[in-house]
Image (spheres, coloured by chain):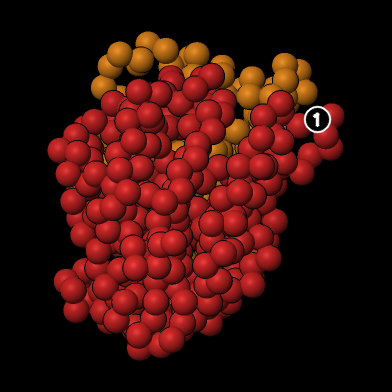
Amino acid sequence: MAKLVATLASTHHPFYLKATTAPPDQQMPQAPEWKRKIEAYRETLAKTKPDVLVMVGSDHFHQIFLDNCPQFLIGKASRYDATFYNEEREFGIPKYLLEGDEDMSRFMHQSLMDQNFDFAFSNELKIDHSIICPIITVRPDNDLPVVPIYTNIFAPPLHSPRRFYDLGRAIRKAIDDYPSDKRVAAIGTGHLSLELGGPRQFMETGPDPVFDRQAIEWLRAGDIDAILANVTHQSMEKSGNATHGFLNFILMLGVAGPEGADYVDNLDLFHTMEAYFTWYPKEQAA
Amino acid sequence: MSKYYVNKFLFTVDRDPEYLKRYIEDPRSFVATWEQSIGPKLLGNEMEASTVHVLTDKEREALINHDFVALFEIGAHFFLNLTLFIGIYDAPYMAKSGPLSFQREFAAKLQHWLELDYPSIAT
Ligand SMILES: [Fe+2]
């Protein structure tokens, strides 16, 4: 059976590449620290020597729109183009071409259906920055095949925090059951408190620094009970109108299981708290 | 009211450099063109007409005026509303007042919503 070797959950920040590759005299003061933290985080993946990446993200109205809007979707293709024109325009993210793993996509799709998750699927999926940002940060060589999974964190009504956690558990089971000797890493991105297009956007900190610190502690401890007792759609809305990206962190905790993280780091950037977590399955931990 | 149709406008313009250019240069005539021949196409199928939605006068005026405050108040999706107007105003604001100046002005113009429940973006 396939072996899960690492679960990574982080924020995605589309300006990382631009911020850290600008000429040094034009870089923001935090750029060197940001780069150091990202490179240290990258190492938590590299040392597990994965063969394939299960990537969890959320399309930001690039391919998916309100005329046809799935809650959960899995990509099933041999390749995935990535980066849309408006992402190049706004963030300066280049185009990528990712290898797919159709066999693993097919297996996971069936497994998730069998576990009662009605997944939509796509045989022609173009990937956006929710999945390209972590490629840029933790696997910039883009040398591994991926199985992309999209969640709806964007167009209400959204599934509950509990459902996201349960989906993470189901993804874990699908990986564990996959008949292959491959080493699999699961990588998902979302947000802590975040405001976009509202009165609290682009402040000195994220819109709710208290939530951000609390969320990091919950994830550090793997305390799913506290998360499910405290985090609701209403509470996330209060923390910032785009805070629902935290649902992907809850999902990734489901993949890892309710355990303390093996690696935790964060960085207080203008307008958002960045956070980086890695879990190693317990039987693998050093 | 058709939040969906407002979002469809923002979505179709944000993803197309040619539409974006026309919306910057002459928003009134572009919005008219959009209502006549771009909006009424089924997404992903150039051949098929979609007759379901129309803009209200208020929605039309908000789009013509690049009025992102009114669009927020209508309940347009925050991501589309931000991204499209960044596409239009970020560069000129940057040249004049530095990085993030447009984004901060956008936030400042919405300060009256700070303590309130925001208009619903549900469609
Ligand atoms: Fe995002």
Indicate the chain on which mark 1 is placed: A
Quarter of the rendering containing residue A116? bottom left
The residue located at (53%, 82%) in the rendering is A78
The type of residue carrying mark 1 is Gln
Left or right: A53 as drawn, with respect to A91 = left
**Chain that is orange in the image:** B
According to the picture, the residue beneath numbered tag 1 turns out to be A26
Quarter of the rendering containing residue A84? bottom right
The residue located at (32%, 49%) in the rendering is A260
Which quadrant of the rendered structure holds the C terminus of chain A?
bottom left
**Chain that is red in the image:** A
Q: Nearer the viewer, residue A175 or B25?
A: A175
Examine the rendered structure and indicate whether residue A286 appears above or below residue B93: below
Which quadrant of the rendered structure holds the N terminus of chain A?
bottom left
Total count of labels = 1
Determine if residue A128 is in view: no
Q: Position of residue A225 (x, y in %)?
A: 17, 44
